[in-house]
Amino acid sequence: MTDFVLHGIPGSPYVRTVALTLEEKDLNWRLAAVPMGGHRTPEYRAIHPFHKIPTLDHGDFRLYETIAILRYLDSMADAPALVPGDARSVARMDQVISITACYVAPRISGALSFPRRVGPMIGMAVDEEALAAAIEPAAETLEEVARLLGDQPFLAGDAITLADLMLAPHISFLPEFEEGRQLLAPHANIDAWITRMETRPGMVATTWERMNAMAAARETVAA
């Protein structure tokens, strides 16, 4: 099968979601790293007309929009199936995917994880007032995720699905900074789920450090 090429910024939760899915499906892929801010350039617009990440190439087929990419990748190999076989589990999976995109991404990743964890690494000043204001909506969002997870091992039941792969890159930053740890404190089930996800080979293979190393290796070869 033709290798997959993933265009995106290392460290982006959305890029990592696609990388995780490629790893879970044991598909051959490589990272075409986009530098921080590089998705806003005219060159990248030729890849994605709306300047978003990620974009996936599979031979002469180009696809963007994360959920479409995940569904496509799941169809590329029968096992492991990342979409459940029953209607209610599929509905729960789709619900969590939507919650991640609509609420977790802006309220947690955008409002807390990026400014606290990523921003200082690229020279951005931390707006403490904005961070403080983000705590309540982030807590509200995490409370609902905890309710939906309940005592299940994964978000749609006993087996990992695209919902887990969509959410994990957003939530996995929380233990790395104080506000995140405080948000997790009331939710032992989410904390255990993060630990469960972090042990998966795909999560190990797609850490920020590993993705940056992939990008550096490609640059060395190109040079």
Image (tube, grey):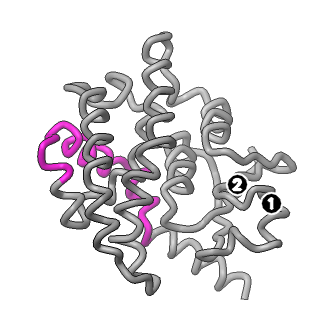
Q: Identify which amino acid the numbered label 2 is placed on.
A: Thr
Relative height, residue 142 to residue 159 (above, below): below
Location of residue 46 in the rendering, given as x and y in whole percent from the top left corner: 85, 63
Above or below for 189 versus 52: above
The residue under the point 82% across, 72% down is 42
Query: Looking at the picture, which amino acid does disc 1 mark?
Result: Ile
Do labels 2 and 1 touch, CB within 8 Å? Answer: yes
In the image shown, does 71 or 106 lie closer to the viewer?
Answer: 106
Q: Secondary structure at mark 1?
A: loop
Q: Position of residue 29 (x, y in %)?
A: 64, 55
> Residue visible at 33% across and 71% down?
116
The C terminus: image quadrant: bottom right
**Splitting the image into 4 quarters, where does residue 121 fall?**
bottom left
Q: Percent x, y for residue 156?
A: 38, 24
10 Å crowding of disc 1: few (<14), some (14-19), many (20+): many
Residue under circle 2?
55
Q: Which residue is mark 1?
A: 47
User: Foreground: 131 or 185?
Assistant: 131
The image shows residue 102, relative to residue 38, as above or below, that is above
Left or right relative to 129: residue 203? right
- Tell me if mark 2 has few (under 14), some (14-19) or many (20+) residues whose alpha carbon lies within 10 angstroms of its own: many
Question: For the point 26% across and 63% down, which residue is it?
Answer: 132
Which residues are drawn in magenta? 183-209
Distance of label 2 from label 1 (alpha carbons): 7 Å
Which sits in the foreground, 46 or 79? 46
Split into 4 quadrants, where in the image is the N terminus?
top right
Q: Residue at x 45, y 31 (%)?
A: 161
